[in-house]
Image (spheres, rainbow, N blue to C red):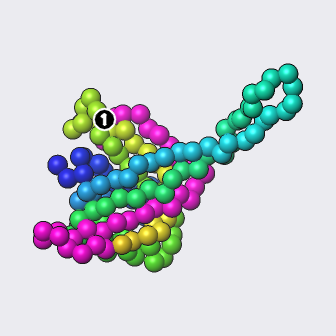
Amino acid sequence: MIGNGIVIEVSTSSPVSYTTIGQIMELDQIELVADKIARTYHSSSNFKRNAAGMVEVSDISFTLLHKSGLDESPDDLYDRVTVGTTYWWRVRIPDTENPTTKYEAFEFQASAGRWAINPPREDDQTVEVTLYIDGTTFSHLQPTTY
């Protein structure tokens, strides 16, 4: 199975209607990191205090096979980088207990900010795409059937 069953989808319409990006080979780690805010004031304790602040979502990068004839092809993604428009995206990762029927999903708004084509290897050519988060929500949906 290519990409261990990972599904990446984009919606370019309103209302949201997702189109699957085909042939995903790899998805980099998705990471959320909160700013570290110092809350220390001098008292009888020698321990510093910190709180979590605003959360930043890492850029989301993935690699796919360069194939034409897909609903959302690498060439379509190239166009998304050149126009810089923000779209709704959904990343679905197979559930470990039911990998063929259930997915854990993330929905968010982002623009495609990087498109890189790699030289062919063993008759396959790949494209790397990076999404820049551009919304105020990053929804984590519990495993469900899609």
**Magenta region's main secondary structure?**
strand
Whether 108 is drawn above or below 124: the answer is above
Residue at 85% across / 21% down in the picture? 44
Q: Amino acid at mark 1?
A: Asp
Towards the viewer: 38 or 92: 38
Residue at 51% across / 53% down in the picture? 58
For the image shown, how many numbered marks are present on the structure? 1
Residue at 53% across / 57% down in the picture? 133
Residue bearing mark 1: 95
Q: Position of residue 125 (x, y in %)?
A: 21, 71
Q: Position of residue 13 (x, y in %)?
A: 44, 62
Q: Quadrant of residue 98?
A: top left
Magenta stretch, residue numbers: 117-146
**8 lies left or right of 25:** right
Whether 122 is drawn above or below 3: the answer is below
Whether 102 is drawn above or below 112: the answer is above
As drawn, the residue found furthest toward the top would be: 44
Towards the viewer: 116 or 22: 116
As drawn, the residue found furthest toward the right would be: 43
Q: Quadrant of residue 143?
A: top left
Residue 42 seen in the figure: yes
**51 lies left or right of 19:** right
Residue 109 seen in the figure: no
Q: Quadrant of residue 112?
A: bottom left
Q: Quadrant of the C terminus?
A: top left
Q: Is residue 37 magenta?
A: no
Q: Is residue 143 magenta?
A: yes
Mark 1 Cα shell of 10 Å, populated few (<14), some (14-19), many (≥20): some
Asked which secondary structure carries label 1, the reply is loop
Residue at 38% across / 65% down in the picture? 129
